[in-house]
């Protein structure tokens, strides 16, 4: 079984996070990942945010346990701790485990904290399902790491499969939204890497980077993916 570091190294979403962290554009984040890896993942996220793998994890603060989310009082206590001066790091990192299981009062208590964390703090939520209340989710940069953990990487479409995908992405009512399409594309990257097709995987990763910063429609994103893999478009 692959270790978490190896799995993440193949993830376009994780690489997108690393670029945001390097550019210091991370304040309140959410990672979709299985509960069994959430504590380990949280430590990796914090070290990436700090830009230093060394000691100092006394500034990594947890609320909740895998499978058992924090209640409203624990969320308020975390907010108070995050307002304090860091022990050894430039900022503290507050982590909510099993955020997808939060009660409505607990989720609401996090709105102000995620909207504007203390000046020397960052927030990280870990969830196994993408079901956060909209007012909370809208305050977070979301990174979906579930496809690589929960299912075998799916191959990109071939032949008539492209026509079906393009129709689904452009049909009235949007049978495939942009989030779902990005999830599919993340799976393609994993599949292409597993097949040794690294150039194609890199080109799709570049498309995912564009989608993370540009407000394209789902149909335009699907067209871009098609041109990348079938027509040789390279956004480098």
Image (cartoon, rainbow, N blue to C red):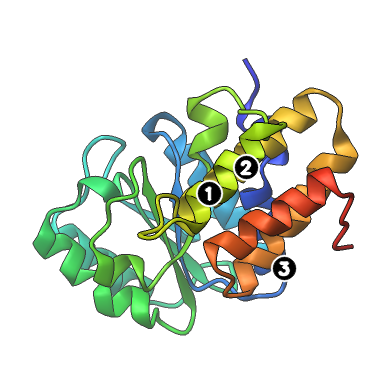
Residue with the mark numbered 3 = 22
Query: In which quadrant of the rendered view does residue 185 lie?
Result: top right
Locate the N terminus by quadrant.
Answer: top right
- Residue 44: horizontal and vertical position, in percent? 59, 47
Position of 118 relative to 165 (above/below): below
Position of 222 relative to 186 (above/below): below
Mark toward the start of the polypeptide (1 vs 3): 3
Q: Nearer the viewer, residue 201 or 54?
A: 201
Position of 194 relative to 54 (above/below): above
Query: In the figure, is residue 10 to the left or right of 146?
Result: right
Residue with the mark numbered 1 = 167
Query: In the figure, is residue 185 to the left or right of 100?
Result: right
Q: Residues within 10 Å of mark 3 (few under 14, many from 20)?
A: few
The residue positioned 71% from the left and 74% from the top of the image is: 23
Locate the C terminus by quadrant.
Answer: bottom right
Residue 3 appears in the picture as rendered: yes
The residue positioned 51% from the left and 24% from the top of the image is: 151
SS for tag 1?
A: helix
What is the CA distance from the residue labelled 1 to the residue labelled 3?
37 Å
Q: Are marks 1 and 2 in contact (CB under 8 Å)?
A: yes
What is the CA distance from the residue labelled 1 to the residue labelled 2?
6 Å
SS for tag 3?
A: helix
Q: Nearer the viewer, residue 96 or 34?
A: 34
The residue positioned 59% from the left and 71% from the top of the image is: 216
- Residue 81: horizontal and vertical position, in percent? 32, 69
Mark toward the start of the polypeptide (3 vs 2): 3
Residue with the mark numbered 2 = 163
The residue positioned 81% from the left and 23% from the top of the image is: 195
């Amino acid at each position: 079984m692959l270790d978490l570091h190896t799995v993440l190294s193949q993830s376009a979403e994780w690489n997108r996070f690393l670029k945001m962290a390097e550019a210091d554009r991370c304040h309140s984040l959410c990672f979709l990942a299985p509960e069994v890896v959430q504590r380990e993942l949280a430590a990796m996220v914090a070290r990436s945010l700090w830009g230093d793998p060394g000691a100092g994890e006394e500034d990594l603060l947890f609320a909740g346990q895998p499978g058992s989310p924090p209640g409203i009082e624990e969320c308020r206590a975390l907010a108070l701790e995050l307002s304090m001066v860091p022990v050894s790091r430039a900022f503290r990192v507050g982590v909510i485990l099993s955020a997808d299981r939060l009660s409505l009062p607990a989720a609401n208590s996090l709105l102000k904290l995620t909207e504007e964390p203390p000046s020397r703090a960052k927030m990280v939520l870990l969830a196994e399902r993408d079901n956060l209340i909209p007012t909370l989710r809208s305050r977070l940069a979301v990174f979906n790491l579930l496809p690589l953990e929960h299912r075998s990487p799916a191959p990109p479409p071939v032949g008539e499969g492209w026509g079906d995908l393009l129709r689904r992405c452009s049909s009235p009512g949007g049978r495939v939204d942009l989030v779902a399409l990005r999830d599919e594309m993340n799976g393609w990257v994993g599949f292409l890497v597993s097949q040794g097709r690294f150039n194609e995987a890199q080109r799709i990763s570049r498309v995912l980077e564009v989608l993370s910063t540009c407000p394209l429609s789902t149909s335009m994103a699907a067209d871009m993916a098609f041109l990348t893999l079938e027509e040789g478009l390279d956004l480098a």
